Image (spheres, coloured by chain):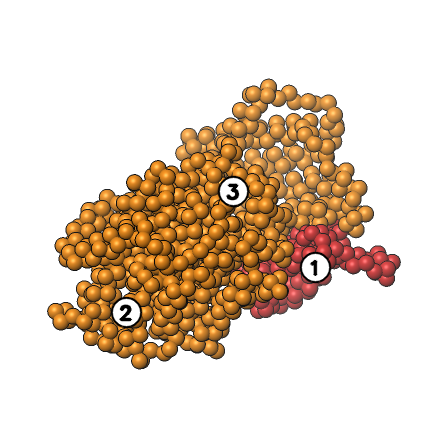
């Protein structure tokens, strides 16, 4: 069953969800949100897309496999935790970019943000991996 | 000067490690020349050590400051004294020849890159071990040698026997490694430092310490296992399954000698323990005699050499056990002697194997024709092994005898054992010479496949140069005086005067030597009667003896483990859940029983608001409905209602993050359920009345327990709540106002890292399980 309206909506929904999840990810430090929630929101976008277009389309859209996505996320997280070592601090310490320009705009960038991005990627990868696997088995195409 | 020289050591050692790790990659461009290339590193180390040796003086050790620190108290620094130099020179010198030798010997093997990887790592670890100034670093390198030797012994892993031999040696030496770790920790706790130089300088004596027995036993097990001493000696002959270069390296200067090194290293601070003498003397004495005795019954050249190695190791352990300056000096000299002749002889065995295709001494004869240089070198090495002049072996044996003769009290026991072992050594040396090289008319040996001329120069180089070095040192033993005297000082001896010479004058010792040689010749003449006798003895011994017992024990252990695992891990999800809930409830019940029944405190609870009450009623009804519903879809939807209800409660009490997560997770769960629903088997009620009742009781009491625990938990504050700290620090230090998120990604980042790792692993598991199914489906489609 190919429903043009649904296909169009699913694409739009996916884009909106990704933008919204990035927003949630970034606001997470000060307001409800964060990597975990952002990751789930992204995956809902992909799941909706997958339900309508099939898992193969999701795979080709992602370009990398979900396993690689999770790996990238874990790696990002670990890198974020190790970065402090290079500034002579204990690992796991938060390191922040000291910049008056950014601070005056109310923006603080640091390794916790990077770590949160890692969580975001891992969660997205985990959910997508499970859902795509199930779709493959039940032949949802 | 010496400081500058020693600075090259860590550099060279790291280069060695690095080149070892890169060996599989380097194999492509360099191919068969890789062995020659890698040989550069031990050669350079040997040169540096050789230049360092004269600088050392007789009473000083060079200790560098740490250049790398693994953790508090575990730092890597170099300690160069006579002891480490003696071992280091042997390890790097023989290692150089072994790598040259491997370059030809391993030519036809597959996976040569890996071979050089293991061998070079082993060599590097061994070198680093003897130069470590930190007991922990020593332990780490000790373990690396165990693991790499496991890989080397089992290098032909497509065959059953090498695999078994490798596993056996790993299990036994790993046991020793574990006890060594315990011993190191105990010593470190008592001394307050792991640095050997500090421990020695502080003049610490552990002999009277209450924990001395424990430390000694741990060290003893480490030494007995690593150095293949009775009753752990049986792994060594098995290790002959390794390629010959490995055998000749492991059993001449390295691996098995690590135990000897450890004994000498710890001797200054635990050598005064009262069991030191007796235990080591007995273990070493038995090993020395058994090894020499059993070597007579073998026909495989490598196995003969393996048993003589066991015997030599026993001699060294026994000498250290005798614990006089004389005996330690004898042990050190004997180590050098043994490393030189044994390295050469093992390589000789490999050369003969390559040129004739067999190592069976009953099938070999008249080898002199094709292998003249090897023969000459082997004869020199055999003279050294038999302990005859003018080789260094003679000096070594004389010192050993002297130490035994001068032993107060116990020489009546030790001396006959030693003389017996040496008689066997003389006999076996003569046997090897007679069977392999002596021009014989009666025996028709196997024909040559290759003669010496067809080999490249670097293949027999090791055998020849080691034999020549033994001869030179035998004629000018004074070269060793200084280094051994320094080694004596740092293995805790008062009398460090060393004056090695080949002629001691007519004395008791010389008399015993002559007696030994004569008896050896007698045994040799009657060898055709003696050898079958010994082989039958060995067969009898083997039947009730350790390799089988050991293998049996391991097999039994695996069986028991498999059976108990099957019982615990039955694979039924419902029983796992039941076990989990019942055990938790029992624990809580026991705890409440002992600390008094819980009183539900109602004061301090906020009043129940109407919308919360409504939510609770709806959720509870949904839960009940889910249990009793007749269809799958209705049950799932009802569970969804419960989930959203819980999410709403979170929301009403201000846990926004949690609520969002709950809603999202609940939604995705719904989607998943709906997706797979049509693929699930028909919904049926299979449980009997009784099991329903049982499940109901467990579920209700688990719920009751959790409720009680939660209601009481708010009164339990073992520590001050940490939330105020987070609230105060969250914005100031972590630039975030959302405390939950700040805790997740900053304060408790390690926890989160663990969580996302677990998530990933779970997803990978799901992926793997499903993909097996997907592949099956695809194959089925293809077949149709």
Q: Give the spatial CA distance, label 2 vs label 3.
A: 46 Å
Q: Which residue is mark 3?
A: B269
**2 vs 3, front mark:** 3
Specify whether B564 is left or right of B600: left
- Determine if marks 2 and 3 fall on one subunit: yes
Q: Is residue B3 visible?
A: yes
Q: Is residue B520 above or below residue B209?
A: below
Are callouts 3 and 1 both on one chain? no
Q: Position of residue B729 (x, y in %)?
A: 78, 44
In the picture, one chain is orange; tell me its letter: B
Chain under numbered label 2: B
Pointer 3 local density, CA inside 10 Å: few below 14, some 14–19, many at least 20: many
* Residue most extreme to the left: B442
Callouts 3 and 1 close, C-beta under 8 Å: no
Q: Which mark is residue A86?
A: 1
- Looking at the rendered image, the disc whose residue lies closer to the viewer, 3 or 1, is 3
Q: Nearer the viewer, mark 2 or mark 1?
A: 2
Q: Which quadrant holds residue A12?
A: bottom right
Dot label at residue A37: none
Question: In the image, which lettered chain appears red?
Answer: A
Question: Sequence-wise, which precedes: disc 2 or disc 3?
Answer: 3
| Number of marks | 3
Instruction: Write down the chain letter for disc 3.
Output: B
Question: From what the image shows, is residue B741 above or below residue B688?
Answer: below
Q: Residue at x 28, y 53 (%)?
A: B513
Where does residue B121 sit, x and y in percent of width and height? 48, 62
Q: What residue is rendered at 37% in x and 77% in y? A: B457
Residue B353 is tagged as: 2
Q: Is residue A46 or residue B34 the one in the foreground?
A: B34
Check the picture and name the quadrant holding the N terminus of chain A: bottom right
């Amino acid at each position: 069953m190919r429903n043009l309206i649904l296909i169009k909506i699913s694409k739009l929904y996916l884009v909106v969800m990704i933008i919204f999840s990035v927003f949630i990810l970034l606001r997470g430090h000060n307001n409800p949100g964060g990597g975990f929630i952002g990751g789930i929101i992204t995956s809902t976008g992909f799941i909706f897309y997958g339900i309508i277009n099939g898992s193969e389309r999701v795979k080709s859209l992602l370009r990398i496999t979900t396993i690689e996505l999770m790996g990238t996320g874990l790696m990002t997280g670990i890198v974020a935790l190790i970065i402090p070592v290079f500034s002579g601090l204990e690992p796991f310490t938060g390191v922040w970019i000291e910049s008056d320009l950014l601070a005056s705009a109310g923006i603080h960038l640091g390794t916790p943000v990077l770590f949160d991005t890692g969580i975001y990627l891992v969660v997205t990868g985990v959910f997508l991996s499970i859902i795509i696997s199930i779709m493959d088995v039940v032949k949802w195409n | 000067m010496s400081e500058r020289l020693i600075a090259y050591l860590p550099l060279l050692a790291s280069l060695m490690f690095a080149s070892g790790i890169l060996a599989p990659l380097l194999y492509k461009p360099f191919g068969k020349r890789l062995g020659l290339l890698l040989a550069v590193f031990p050669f350079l180390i040997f040169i540096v050590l050789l230049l360092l040796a004269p600088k050392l003086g007789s009473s000083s050790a060079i200790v560098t400051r740490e250049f790398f620190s693994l953790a508090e108290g575990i730092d890597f620094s170099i300690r160069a004294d006579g002891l480490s130099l003696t071992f280091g020179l042997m390890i790097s010198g023989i290692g150089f020849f072994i790598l040259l030798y491997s370059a030809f010997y391993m030519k036809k093997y597959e996976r040569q890159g890996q071979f050089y990887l293991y061998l070079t790592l082993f060599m590097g670890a061994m070198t680093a071990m003897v130069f470590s100034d930190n007991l922990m670093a020593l332990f780490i390198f000790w373990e690396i040698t165990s693991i790499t030797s496991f890989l080397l012994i089992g290098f032909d892993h497509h065959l059953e026997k090498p695999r078994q031999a490798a596993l056996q040696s790993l299990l036994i030496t790993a046991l020793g490694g574990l006890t060594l770790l315990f011993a190191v920790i105990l010593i470190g706790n008592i001394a307050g430092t792991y640095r050997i130089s500090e421990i020695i300088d502080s003049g610490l004596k552990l002999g009277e310490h209450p924990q001395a027995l424990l430390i000694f036993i741990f060290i003893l097990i480490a030494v007995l296992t690593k150095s293949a001493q009775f009753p752990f000696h049986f792994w060594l002959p098995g290790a002959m399954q390794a390629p010959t270069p490995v055998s000749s390296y492991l059993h001449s200067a390295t691996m098995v000698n690590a135990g000897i090194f450890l004994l000498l290293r710890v001797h200054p601070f635990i050598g005064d323990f009262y069991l030191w003498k007796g235990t080591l003397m007995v273990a070493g004495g038995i090993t020395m005699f058994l090894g020499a005795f059993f070597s007579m019954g073998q026909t495989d050249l490598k196995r003969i050499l393996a048993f003589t190695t066991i015997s030599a190791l026993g001699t060294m352990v026994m000498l250290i056990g005798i614990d006089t300056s004389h005996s330690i000096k004898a042990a050190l000299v004997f180590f050098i002697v043994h490393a030189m002749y044994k390295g050469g002889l093992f390589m000789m065995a490999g050369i003969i194997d390559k040129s004739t295709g067999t190592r069976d001494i009953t099938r070999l004869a008249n080898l002199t024709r094709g292998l003249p240089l090897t023969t000459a070198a082997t004869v020199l090495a055999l003279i050294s092994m038999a302990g005859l002049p003018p080789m260094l072996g003679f000096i070594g044996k004389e010192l050993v005898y002297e130490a035994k003769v001068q032993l107060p009290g116990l020489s009546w026991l030790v001396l006959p054992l030693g003389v017996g072992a040496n008689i066997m050594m003389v006999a076996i040396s003569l046997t090897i010479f007679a069977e392999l090289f002596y021009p014989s008319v009666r025996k028709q040996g196997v024909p040559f496949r290759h003669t010496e001329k067809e080999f490249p120069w670097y293949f027999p180089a090791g055998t020849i140069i080691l034999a020549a070095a033994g001869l030179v040192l035998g004629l000018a033993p004074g070269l060793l005086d200084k280094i051994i005297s320094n080694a004596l000082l740092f293995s805790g001896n008062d009398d460090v005067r060393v004056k090695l010479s080949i002629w001691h004058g007519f004395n008791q010792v010389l008399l015993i030597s002559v007696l030994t040689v004569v008896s050896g010749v007698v045994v040799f003449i009657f060898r055709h009667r003696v050898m079958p006798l010994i082989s039958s003895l060995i067969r009898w011994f083997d039947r009730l003896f350790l390799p089988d017992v050991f293998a049996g024990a391991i097999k039994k252990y695996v069986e028991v483990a498999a059976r108990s695992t099957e019982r615990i891990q039955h694979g039924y999800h419902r029983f796992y859940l039941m076990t989990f809930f019942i055990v938790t409830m029992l624990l809580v019940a026991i705890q409440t029983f002992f600390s008094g029944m819980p009183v539900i405190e109602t004061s301090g609870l906020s009043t129940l608001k109407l919308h919360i009450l409504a939510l609770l009623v709806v959720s509870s009804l949904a839960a009940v409905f889910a249990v009793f519903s007749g269809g799958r879809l209705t049950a799932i939807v009802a569970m969804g209602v419960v989930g959203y209800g819980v999410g709403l409660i979170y929301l009403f009490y201000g846990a926004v993050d949690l609520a969002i997560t709950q809603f999202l997770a609940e939604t995705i769960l719904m989607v998943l359920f709906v997706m797979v629903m049509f693929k699930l088997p028909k919904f049926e009620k299979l449980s009997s009345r009784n099991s329903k009742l049982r499940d109901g009781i467990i579920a209700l009491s688990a719920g009751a327990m959790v409720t009680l625990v939660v209601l009481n938990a708010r009164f339990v504050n073992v520590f001050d709540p940490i939330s105020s700290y987070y609230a105060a620090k969250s914005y100031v230090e972590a630039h975030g106002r959302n405390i939950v998120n700040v805790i997740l990604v900053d304060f408790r980042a390690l926890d989160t890292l663990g969580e996302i790792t677990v998530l990933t692993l779970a997803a990978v598991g799901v992926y793997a399980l499903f993909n097996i199914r997907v592949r099956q489906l695809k194959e089925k489609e293809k077949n149709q």
